């Protein structure tokens, strides 16, 4: 039978690494499982300007390297390239199945974050990686001096649109409403940027091209009229859903899969906590993920004390 850990954390983004720091510092034997490399979503963010302590801003990659280095100073073991495919609870211990084997623990913190929602329109699946992307920081450089479209009107869409504007010739922002949801500071920057053009009240209905994206067809949400926008790239930011399928019925979720927690970040299964973007909450940011990671860790520590005494 696999070794029994006190705590397992699933996901090495800001929430998971923070939980790891708190648990290890409290002397709780912990294992962190990460399906890729440590760092989480911020490694794809060009510049983080709103994480306290970095008044000049910091690249997402550098910030997360610092988080991981900090966790390692407390000896946190991080098992990278270990994707969790299932978690069950036998009444006493959690059994965690990964691509690399099985692990057991007394308590668990889920910090697996989110994944982008697809638009679900014709051409999207066929042209992913051939001009359609969900990450401008990862793929923007392939579109130097070309025209691209960004779909969405929230923070992610506008932040990524602004970062694309440094590289590409033109950024069409295609938004189904007539106003952006993004924060004012981002809106102001976007409206000032001469490379950004806003197509209001437009909904993408098809992405076309033979081997690569050549155009996007949009429908006017007011008149129903269709139009064609010639672009080489389409960057999609229409929402995110939680990655929680591997938890079966150990947790309650909302319609988008976000885990419903109590005020201590506990779930309906005792000993299972959720922190960061993966849980139902109002603001998904690095700072709130960090707060969640700390709170979940302290509550798990208390839970372990209780069951061991
Ligand atoms: C385009 C964009 C720009 C952003 N800019 C900012 C910004 O400027 N400032 C800011 O504060 N926030 C920003 N955010 C939000 C921020 O990235 C998130 O709020 C934050 O990363 C949440 O941290 P987390 O640890 O909860 O999840 P994540 O960072 O998503 O980390 C989750 C980790 O879990 C791993 N994982 C997932 N499933 C499994 C599995 N089954 N098994 C093992 N590991 C798994 C993932 O690989 C990942 O490493 C931005 C987000 C986007 C999309």
Image (cartoon, helix red, strand yellow):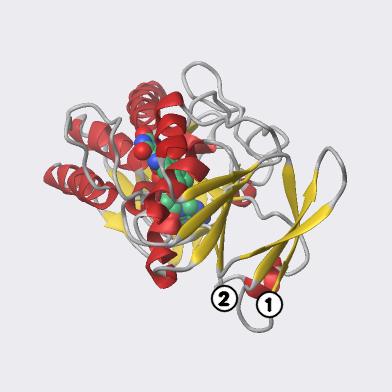
Figure label count: 2
| Residue located farthest toward the bottom when viewing the structure as drawn | 211
Q: Quadrant of ligand 1?
A: top left
- Quick check: can you spot residue 165? yes
Task: Tell which circle, 2 or 1, labels the residue nearer the N-terminal end.
Answer: 2
Marks 2 and 1 sit apart, C-alpha to C-alpha, by 9 Å
Identify the residue at horizontal 81%, vertical 41% (top origin).
Answer: 221
> Closest to the observer: 149 or 242?
149
| Residue located farthest toward the front when viewing the structure as drawn | 194
> Closest to the observer: 4 or 154?
154
**Image coordinates for residue 148, horizontal then vertical, percent:** 53, 61
**Image coordinates for residue 304, horizontal then vertical, percent:** 37, 28
Which mark, by number, is residue 209? 1
Residue mark closest to the camera, 2 vs 1:
1
| Mark 2 burial class by Cα count in 10 Å: few <14, some 14-19, many 20+ | some
Where disc 1 sits, the SS reads loop
Identify the residue at horizontal 20%, vertical 50% (top origin).
Answer: 62
Where disc 2 sits, the SS reads loop
Label 2 belongs to which residue? 130
Which mark, by number, is residue 246? none
**Image coordinates for residue 150, horizontal then vertical, percent:** 56, 52
Quarter of the image for the N terminus: give it: bottom left
Q: Horizontally, is 172 left or right of 65 in the view?
A: right
């Amino acid at each position: 039978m696999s070794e029994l850990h006190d705590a397992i954390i699933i996901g090495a983004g800001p929430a998971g690494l923070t939980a790891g720091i708190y648990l290890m510092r409290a002397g709780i034997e912990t294992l962190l499982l990460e399906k890729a490399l440590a760092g989480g979503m911020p490694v794809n963010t060009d510049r983080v300007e709103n994480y306290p302590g970095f008044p000049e801003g910091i690249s997402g990659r550098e910030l997360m390297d610092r988080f991981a280095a900090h966790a390692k100073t407390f000896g946190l073991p991080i098992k990278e390239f270990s994707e969790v495919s299932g978690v069950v609870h036998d009444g006493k211990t959690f059994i965690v199945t990964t691509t690399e084997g099985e692990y057991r623990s007394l308590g668990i913190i889920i910090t697996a974050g989110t994944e982008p929602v697809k638009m679900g329109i014709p051409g999207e699946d066929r042209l992913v990686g051939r001009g359609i992307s969900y990450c401008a920081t990862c793929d923007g450089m392939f579109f130097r001096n070309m025209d691209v479209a960004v779909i969405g009107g929230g923070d992610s869409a506008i932040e990524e649109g602004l970062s694309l504007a440094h590289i590409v010739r033109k950024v069409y922002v295609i938004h189904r409403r007539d106003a952006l949801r993004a924060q004012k500071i981002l809106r102001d920057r976007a409206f000032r940027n001469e490379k950004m053009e806003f197509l209001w009240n437009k909904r993408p209905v098809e992405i076309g091209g033979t081997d690569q994206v050549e155009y996007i067809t949009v429908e006017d949400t007011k008149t129903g009229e269709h139009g064609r926008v010639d672009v080489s790239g389409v960057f999609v930011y229409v929402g995110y859903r939680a990655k929680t399928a591997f938890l079966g019925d150990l947790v309650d979720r909302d319609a988008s899969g976000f885990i419903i927690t109590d005020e201590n970040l506990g779930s309906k299964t005792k000993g299972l906590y959720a922190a960061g973007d993966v849980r139902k909450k109002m603001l998904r940011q690095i700072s709130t993920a960090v707060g969640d990671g700390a709170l979940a860790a302290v509550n798990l520590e208390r839970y372990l004390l209780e069951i061991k005494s």
